Amino acid sequence: MKVKVLSKSGAETGREINLPDDIFGIEPNDHAVYLTVKSYLAAQRQGTHKSKEKWEVARTTKKAFRQKGTGGARRGSMKSPLVKGGGRAFGPKPHDYDIKVNKKVKDLARRSALTHKAKNGNIIIVEDFNTAAAKTKDFAAVVKGLKLNGTKSIFVMEGAEKNTILSARNIPTIALTEAKNLNIYDIMNCKKLILSEGAVKTIESNFSNN
């Protein structure tokens, strides 16, 4: 699949780049995408939720009322889950939410996600979108030139460039990531995927090494 290469101002450069069919043109597997996104989101959960059980509550164990004749249950400790302020029965405990997904399934999912973006015309190739200074207005000009104002977009660069990262971080609909860190959620959680030429080469290299 051939895609035109644009300048950061949005103008055509007269060049095209070939996106390999084994990455950007496969038969998408939507279930693999679903499983991998679900696994990614599950891994973001801290799993540190905790409630106190009966033995952890600091309350008296002195019998609150006589054993019989009250018409109520024969309850001794004020730590009981039946009493306001007592421990919680079967409460949440810390645990992880990790969902295991095989490496080949993750690889298929990323290829499928990239294929969906390519087939729907939502991949834009830019020769370079780095900014010389750490100014939001400079990157805002790039966004405007590419006609992405108000469009949720992920800019993928070959390597970290401090000024570019600082320039883009205050634009609410824009996110930046390095090609080596591009994950399934980044791809699926945006409308437009903007790749620098260097990022395309890095993505191809990463898949060839799998």
Image (cartoon, rainbow, N blue to C red):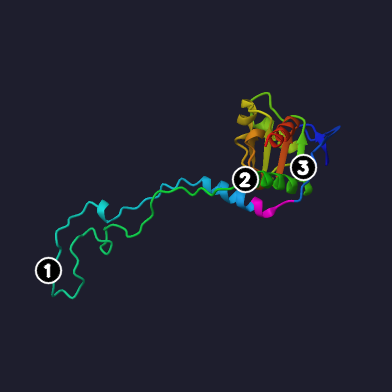
How far is the residue under mark 1 from the one under mark 2?
60 Å
Q: Earlier in the sequence, mark 1 or mark 3?
A: 3
How far is the residue under mark 1 from the one under mark 3?
78 Å
How far is the residue under mark 2 from the one under mark 3?
20 Å
Expressed as whole percent of the image width and height from the top left, the position of residue 65 reads: 14, 66
Residue at 73% x, 36% y is 195
Residue 190 in view (yes/no): no
Magenta-span inclusion, residue 54? no
**Which of label 2 and label 3 is nearer to you?**
3
Q: Which residue is mark 2?
A: 185
Please name the amino acid that badge 1 sits on: Arg
**Image: magenta residue range:** 28-33
Check residue 129 in the rendering and tell me which mark sits there, or answer none.
none
Q: Earlier in the sequence, mark 2 or mark 3?
A: 3
Expressed as whole percent of the image width and height from the top left, the position of residue 64 reads: 15, 63
SS for callout 1: loop
Residue at 71% x, 48% y is 112
Q: Which residue is mark 3?
A: 22
| Residue closest to the eye, 6 or 9 | 6
Q: Residues within 10 Å of mark 2 (few under 14, many from 20)?
A: some
User: Decide: marks 1, 3 in contact (CB < 8 A)?
Assistant: no
